[in-house]
Image (cartoon, rainbow, N blue to C red):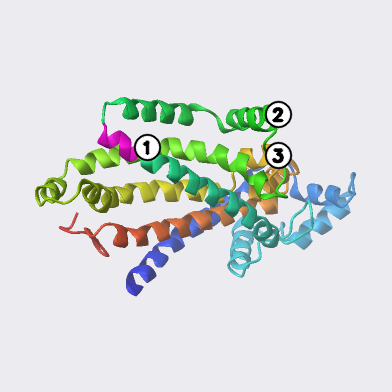
Amino acid sequence: MTRYIARRLLYLVPVWLGISLLAFSLALLAPGDPVRSTLQAQGIDAPSAEQVQALRRELGLDDPGPVRYAKWVADAVRGDLGESIRTGEPVLRSLTDRFPRTAQLALIAIVLGLVIALPLGVLAAIFRERAVDHVSRVGALVGASIPSFWLSYLLIIVFAVQLRLLPVAGSNTPQHVILPALTLAIGAAAGLTRLTRSAMLEELTQEYVRTARSKGLREVVVLVRHALRNALVAIVTVTGIRLAGLLGGAVIVETIFAWPGIGKYVVDSISARDYPTIQGFVLFAGTLVLLINLAVDLMYVWLDPRVRLGGRAGGH
């Protein structure tokens, strides 16, 4: 297992470097001048040519692109993503300070989504083409089709304006997390319900399920211990991708509900053309995705006995 983890970590290195190159290129391709933006953030609305040139030398922007990229990557490896133009704070510290709020929202949303999706998907597969199957498929289709911003405002109108049960913006109480988490959970549950249904339908046609039933095992054991466990391989993959996206910042939902997470912080930084923060966010979010994908790969070994560290049994 240790060798497998080491090999997987080694594979992540070129991917991480590619993400870092993409993040660094954002500053080169983005409109505007980061030097003038920095000076304006310092209160200098009409900087002189000398001030612009002095700050350009200080930031190392006179160096060739490859040299600047190498310095930026070396600093990033040491945990230095630069300083925010807008706030003057270290980018990494700003992101890590806000990450727990985004992680709280994302984890609650993904758990709630699974609580909704797994029972519905399993029941839809068991009672295929019956009422519960049709209801779950229609519900999943509706949930996947509603834009998150529209769903956010719909939930606000119902639960905050009409019923006055829940607060709209902020994060001061546990009640504040309900609406944004529910918004994200509905979108996640829609896709996971359809995936659970299709994965269960595929597993229920396998030979090992018929063998388990012929041995007289209880139906609940066949469904949960055998079919669902193997179906979880695909479900875990998609859940990991969903979670990675949410941890990277649920931008629209966090902005609508004024949730003080990474997403809202990055939106404010984009509006201010805070290029170091944008670069740091892309690298930070990309690293999270890589680590979550690694965790998902390791879970395969536990979830599916057919998976081997070198690949599937039989060489597939």
Tell whether 291 sits left or right of 66.
left
Q: Quadrant of residue 309?
A: bottom left
Mark 3 packing: few (<14 Cα in 10 Å), some, or many (20+)?
Answer: many
Residue lying at the far bottom of the rendered structure: 2
Magenta stretch, residue numbers: 121-127
Q: Position of residue 188 (x, y in %)?
A: 47, 40
Residue underneath mark 3: 167
- Give the residue drawn at x 40%, y 67%: 10
Q: Magenta segment: does it hold 123?
A: yes
In the drawing, does residue 65 fall left or right of residue 237?
right
Write the residue at 33% across / 69% down. 4
Mark 1 — residue? Answer: 120
According to the picture, the residue beneath numbered tag 2 turns out to be 161
Q: Quadrant of the N terminus?
A: bottom left
> Where residue 123 sits: x, y (%)?
31, 37
Q: Quadrant of residue 135?
A: top left
Q: Earlier in the sequence, mark 1 or mark 2?
A: 1
Q: Residue at x 62, y 52 (%)?
A: 281
Please tell me whether mark 2 sits on a helix, a strand or a loop.
Answer: helix
In the rendered structure, the answer to whether residue 211 lies left or right of residue 291 reads: left
Amino acid type, mark 1? Leu
- 168 over 261 or under it: above or below: above
Alpha-carbon span between mark 1 and mark 2: 30 Å
Q: Is 296 or 11 nearer to us in this picture? A: 296
Residue 58 visible here: yes
Secondary structure beneath label 1: helix
Q: Amino acid at mark 3?
A: Pro
Q: Tell which circle, 3 or 2, labels the residue nearer the N-terminal end.
A: 2
